[in-house]
Amino acid sequence: EEGEEEGEEEGEERDESRRTRRRFSIRKVVSNLPSALLIFLLGVVLAFIRKPSIVHDITFGPSKIKVVKMNKEAWKNGFFKGTIPQLPLSVLNSVVAVVKLSYDLFPEKQFSATSVS
């Protein structure tokens, strides 16, 4: 009986060890994936959860080219609601990215957002 108990304990320890290794390998794989891919996949899953019928609307391949006719009011509306709010974000992102890259490449030099912009 004592030998059986020891064998069972060793078996349980091996199972626990396998589970730990499996969890570690899953974490390793997930941590090596680009975060943008994970966010994209999360969005796809949430889209399917929110509207399961979307599966039937998915098509692959190129779509047909359509000429979009915009009137003056639609263009003005898009410019004020889309372009102008995006400008500060784009400028900020490009400046911050250049400062970070410059610091990474040349750590001995001092870079600031003001000097780069």
Image: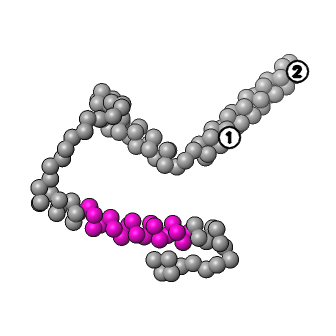
- Residue at 27% across / 67% down in the picture? 84
Q: Is residue 21 above or below residue 81?
A: above
Where does residue 76 sit, x and y in percent of width and height? Answer: 16, 63
Q: Position of residue 19 (x, y in %)?
A: 69, 33
Residue 52 appears in the figure:
no
Q: Would residue 88 appear left or right of 21 to someone viewing this image?
A: left
Asked whether disc 2 touches disc 1, contact meaning CB atoms under 8 Å apart, the reply is: no
Mark 2 surroundings within 10 Å by alpha-carbon count, few (fewer than 14), some (14 through 19), many (20 or more) = few
Q: How many marks?
A: 2
Relative horizontal placement of residue 90, taking residue 9 as reference (left or right): left
- Say which quadrant the N terminus sits in: top right
What residue type is disc 2 on? Answer: Gly
Which label sits on residue 24?
1
Query: Which-is-in-front pick, marks 2 and 1?
Result: 1
- Residue 66 or 94: which is nearer the viewer? 66
Measured along the vertical axis of the image, is residue 87 above or below residue 69? below
Q: Is residue 62 left or right of residue 102?
A: left
Residue 70 x/y as whole percent: 15, 53
Secondary element under disc 1, as helix, strand or loop, is helix
> Visible in this render: residue 26?
yes
Within the magenta stretch, is there residue 86?
A: yes
First of labels 2, 1 by sequence position: 2
Q: CA distance from mark 2 to mark 1?
A: 31 Å
Q: Which residues are magenta?
A: 81-100
Answer whether residue 15 is magenta in the image: no
Residue annotated with mark 2: 3
Q: Nearer the viewer, residue 28 or 87?
A: 87
Q: Is residue 101 shown above or below 7? A: below
Q: Which residue is painted at 42% across and 70% down in the image? A: 92
- Using the rendered view, name the quadrant where residue 85 is placed: bottom left
Q: Is residue 26 above or below residue 100?
A: above
Instruction: Name the amino acid, label 1.
Output: Phe
